[in-house]
Image (cartoon, helix red, strand yellow):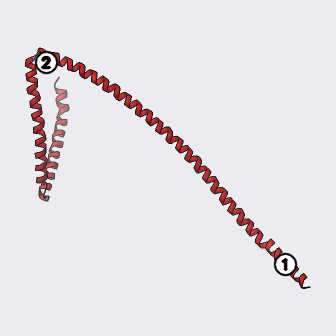
Amino acid sequence: MEIIAELVAFVIVILVIWRFVVPVLKKMVTARQDTVQQQVDEAEEATRKLNEAQAKLESAVEEARQEAARIRDDARADATRIHDELVEQAKREIERTKARGGEQLAAQRDQVVRQMRAELGAQSYGLAEKLVVESLADESARRASVDDFLDDIDRLVETRAATSADAPATAGGGA
């Protein structure tokens, strides 16, 4: 009798497990399988997108290489053309210089003047920069400089306004 009671209790436990636990476990397993499948699908999609991006990158790199080669070839052609032009120009300049010795002296004098002006300009620029830095060192000098600049702009605007107002009258009355 005890065996029958144990057997009945065992069957009841099996039925309770079958009725309540198995469906919950099946739902959990199904949900987990769905989640894993979704993750696998997402991973495959990400892999596909990665492969597409890599293909695009490789294509872009190849296009960039081709473009760089084209630019390099163009630059070489330009350099050759410029070189030829400069050589031709130099030959003409030599002939002209031989024919006109006086012009050569004038050209050299002009070149020295240009160099002197360039050096003087660079030195003037440095000195002007130093003076501007020193003059703007304190607040009152900065404000005065800004006020002078704004006054100059106002005068310029007024001068242009007066000039443009006078321009139509002189253009129509000249004929």
**Residue at point 42%, 33% (across, down):** 67
**Three-letter code for the amino acid on which mark 2 is drawn:** Thr
> Label 2's element?
helix
In contact (CB < 8 Å): disc 1 and disc 2: no
| Kind of residue indicated by mark 1 | Phe
Q: Is residue 89 left or right of residue 148?
A: right
Q: Which mark is residue 138?
A: none
Q: Nearer the viewer, residue 158 or 141?
A: 141
Q: Measuring 20% from the left and 18% from the top, which residue is drawn there?
A: 91
Question: What residue is shown at x 31% (from left), y 27% (from top)?
Answer: 79
x 55%, y 43%: residue:
52
Task: Choose top left, top right, bottom left or bottom right for residue 173.
Answer: top left
For mark 2, does the 10 Å Cα neighbourhood hold few (<14), some (14 to 19), or many (20 or more) residues? some
Report the label total.
2
- Quadrant assignment, res 35: bottom right
Image location of residue 54, percent across then percent down: 52, 44
Which residue reaches farthest front?
3
Report the front residue among 137 and 114.
114
Give whichever of discs 1 and 2 has the lower sequence position. Answer: 1
Is residue 107 rendered to the left or right of residue 16? left
Residue 33 position (above or below residue 124): below
Mark 2 highlights which residue?
Answer: 97
Q: CA distance from mark 1 to mark 2?
A: 122 Å
Query: Split into 4 quadrants, where in the image is the C terminus?
Result: top left
Q: Disc 1 designates what residue?
A: 10
Image coords of residue 131 (percent x, y)? 10, 49
Q: Position of residue 3 (x, y in %)?
A: 89, 82
Eyeballing the image, is 101 above or below 19?
above
Quarter of the rendering occupied by the N terminus: bottom right
Query: Is 173 or 59 nearer to us in this picture?
Result: 59
Q: Residue furthest top?
A: 99
